[in-house]
Image (cartoon, rainbow, N blue to C red):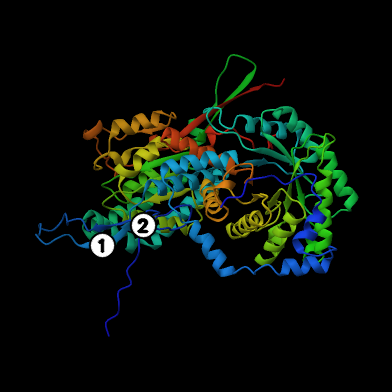
Amino acid sequence: MARVDVKKTYKLYIGGKFPRSESGRSYEVYAAPSTTRRPRTEPPRFLANAAQGSRKDARDAVTAARAAQPGWAGATAYNRGQVLYRVAEVMESRRPQLVQEVRDAEGLSPAAAEAVVSQAIDRWVWYAGWSDKYVQILGGLNPVAGPYFNISASEPTGVVAVLAPQGSSLLGLVSVLAPIIVSGNAAVVVTSADRPLPAITLAECLATSDVPGGVVNIISGKASEIAPWLASHRDVNAIDLCGAADADGVDWAALEEASADNLKRVLRPAGEGAGAVEPDWSQTPDLSRLTAFLETKTVWHPKGR
Amino acid sequence: MNTPATDVDSTLDATARARDLVGVSRLTNSALTGWLHGLPGVDQVGCEARAAGLGTRSIKTTSKAWAIDLAISMIDLTTLEGADTRGRVRGLAAKALLPDPSDLSTPRPAAVCVYGDMVTTAKEVLGDSGVKVAAVATAFPSGRASMAVKLADTQDAVRAGADEIDMVIDRGAFLSGDYLTVFHQIAEVKKACVRADGSAARLKVIMETGELVTYDNVRRASWLSMLAGGDFIKTSTGKIQPAATLPVTLIMLEAVRDWRDLTGTMVGVKPAGGIKTSKDAIKFLVTVHEIAGEDWLDNHWFRFGASSLLNDLLLQRQRMTTGAYSGANYIADDSPSTAY
């Protein structure tokens, strides 16, 4: 007797739980056409139904992120590094699944998908290593003309909204997410609209690797629908517009204007408006994505004799 | 259809009226027991299903804006902690006067609810602003003290200027079937609420429904409290879980509705404890409207005992006026400072 398929429901990741969208909506996700074989005329292959997040899901995610952020920032840098390294371990153990999903999502050859997943895991480890090192590099004792110590130290910005890259569904996502959370920020991520499945699997890795619930929240759906609410949300401290490049119907000017209302930090991708492009994620990053979501606290202290 | 809305008369002789209503010449515990146990039992499943059903109503934008303002005006802004300081009470009272400094059209809460020794402090800030001062009395929250102490506690708060007294019933006596004791205690405290000039503080009777075990007991305690002269029936102290649930409040709303049919006097309802979100508050308002009726949609007859609810209502209000989701940074912080 033929076995009935057990199909997976891809859900959102909010506050450490996997809810369906509050709106009850879902949308169909199809495989990308292969980039290695000759183009064929058959219709795209159906992969799964993904939850289509709404503004209320984003609101709930921000609430969860706000609640989780102080505890995460309060953990020792060493501990955050350990936890993030653990994420890489769990990703490694799910490698075949990630490879398959990246292949389907991006139309890569098996070898190329393997390489992308390896890079994504390595990038997570790379950023994890920075957890207890960047503060020394970015801060320190400032020279002042007076009998004072003057010390600068980096602190996380708070709750960061992220429009994940539309093209690179796993490596790109890891490259924007890891530098945000390594310093103690909490993130609300809107996935690539057409390629959400690797992001949801990453959420499963996060959920099983000691990252406190709410530190990372992942919402699949359309950036054009959810981004304006995150940009205007007064409890969001910064927004990474990376995934606005190539996203359908995203109004850049409106997003930046809304972000200005509560003086959010805005990180824009390279290029202007419609000409914006996704970076080449295969390059080894510098610290700019990490420093973009840090605040510098400077303390004056009188010198004793 | 509607009977006129009248307050409970402060000079009321509760025992005489109770004799009248119960239909006996002498009010004994067995007479009270017979009367209270003669009330129809609560259908638990039906009650919970009704409450759940009322909680699923879709509220449209304009109604929601109205409901949020109404809910804010119904709040008894509460701080009942051992660690309360005068500064904290002053801060809370200042917040009641100006709940949202960024929007002066925000209504004020109905009252500030504090321990008896903080009444003077709260009164100093609130003055004649119209925001009332409510004091918990009668050995709140347990109610385990002698009657003399309970009465002194009440008189003390009334003399300090409390507009409203929140008393707790003796749950031990109630649960052991000693309804007459509970009746007399409420009636005595009611008398202690009378001021020197003959006016009286309104009396809220806290039944602590979380300790009453069954819905039938909630119904009996509601009727007993009203019979003894309570101006308000209140679910909980906020110190016990579960506190104000929707089914319990529904039963109490049925009780005040039926009480008005029977006696012509209106009694208020105050759910307290555990109502934290605007969504919850609106569910309660829907229930008030559907069960007791529109007359109770007024802060003279319905209150929320809450501390964090106000902040969430303010956030939702800001969301509706500005069009953007708001955050805790845009709300006056009334949490006790732990920095020192």
Q: How many marks?
A: 2
Label at residue A108: none
The secondary structure type at the circle numbered 1 is strand
Asked if A284 appears above or below A13 in the picture, the reply is above
Q: What residue is drawn where x is 70% and y is 58%?
A: B222
Q: Position of residue A153 (x, y in %)?
A: 54, 31
Nearer to the camera, A253 or A131: A253
Image side of residue A82 versus residue B87, left or right: left
Residue pointed to by mark 1: A47
Q: Position of residue A28 (x, y in %)?
A: 26, 58
**Pointers 1 and 2 in contact (CB under 8 A)?**
no
Image side of residue B133 versus residue A195, left or right: right
The amino acid marked with disc number 2 is Gly
Residue pointed to by mark 2: A24
Q: Is residue A158 visible?
A: no
The amino acid marked with disc number 1 is Leu
The secondary structure type at the circle numbered 2 is loop
Nearer to the camera, A70 or B309: B309
Q: Quadrant of the C terminus of chain A?
A: top right
Q: Position of residue A69 (x, y in %)?
A: 52, 43
Q: What residue is drawn where x is 60% and y is 43%?
A: B308
Image side of residue A224 versus residue A128, left or right: left
Nearer to the camera, B187 or B147: B187
Chain containing the residue with disc 1: A
